[in-house]
Image (tube, grey):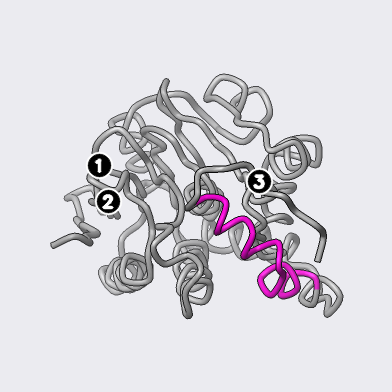
Amino acid sequence: MDVAVNVTVGVDRVGVIELDRPERRNALNVETCGRIVAAAEELRAAAVRAVVVTGTGTSFCSGADFGEVYGEGFRDALHAALGAVHSLPVPVVAAVNGPAIGAGTQLAIACDLRVAAEGAVFALPTARLGLAVNPWTIRRLAQVAGGATARALLLACDTVGAELALNRGLVDRLGTLEDARALAAELAGLAPLTLAYNKLVLDRVELGEEDPVLADAFEGCWRSADLEEGRTARSEKRVPAYEGR
């Protein structure tokens, strides 16, 4: 099977969602996103007290599978997966075991806390590709890591390593999957109603109002000629010539 998301529940009531597409560096496609949603629902039903999200192999998540990112349904599937992880009523810890690129960074910031391994890097190079992330991602990134870091990732298309991410607040701790599991086990022993309330309030603070101008600008990127130029340039292995239309 090309697509896999593993789900386990430990005796410590910590659930684990593990992306298992090492041959694709755990890239996301529609089916993978659907399985993330199903995994989150399974763990919610299992009444776990904390969740760890990670990837197999040397990558956390290399981003969107470019075989599907331009296709129908991928954006909705991705947003559903991010929402399913983010809306879990228990603490969610991302064990970022390697590169978290594009949708991988989105998945990491959908979690409440991030533990990054030495080889972890974060990037949202949408401007290099003519793509766009939804307004929630940009607001969430700014809330988690600050406006300066959000601008560095989104405008300068910087790649941020684990140490710098820790200094900027994008990462909470440096460590391995075992460290992330230990943190999750510690959180699982805290008062669950208090944690759920704290998450609820924090999410309301960052939610903001829906802005039709932002929605139009987001959709405009996905309808643009520049999007097609980015797609073509990537397939032809050349530098894209964007025209702003």
x 57%, y 51%: residue: 233
How far apart are the alpha carbons under marks 1 and 2? 7 Å
Q: Crowdedness of circle 2 by 10 Å Cα count: few (<14), some, many (20+)? A: many
**In terms of secondary structure, what is the magenta stretch mainly?**
helix
The location of residue 217, given as percent across then percent down, is 80, 70
Secondary structure at numbered mark 2: strand
Q: Which marked residue is nearer to the observer: mark 1 or mark 3? A: 3
Q: What amino acid type is highlighted by mark number 1?
A: Thr
Q: Is residue 228 part of the magenta span, yes or no?
A: yes
Q: In the drawing, does residue 4 fall left or right of residue 231? A: left
Q: What amino acid type is highlighted by mark number 2?
A: Glu
Q: Quadrant of the N terminus?
A: bottom left
Secondary structure at numbered mark 3: helix
Identify the residue under disc 3.
Answer: 128
Q: As displayed, is residue 103 above or below residue 115?
A: below
Q: Which marked residue is nearer to the observer: mark 3 or mark 2? A: 3
Sooner in the amino-acid sequence: mark 1 or mark 2:
2
The residue lying toward the viewer, choosing from 242 and 122, is 242
Identify the residue under disc 2.
Answer: 18
Q: As displayed, is residue 54 above or below residue 49?
A: above
The location of residue 182, given as percent across then percent down, is 32, 34
Q: Is residue 205 part of the magenta span, yes or no?
A: no
Q: What amino acid type is highlighted by mark number 3?
A: Arg
Q: Crowdedness of circle 1 by 10 Å Cα count: few (<14), some, many (20+)? A: some
The location of residue 213, given as percent across then percent down, is 86, 75
Q: Are marks 1 and 2 in contact (CB under 8 Å)?
A: yes
- Which numbered dot is residue 56? 1
x 29%, y 48%: residue: 24
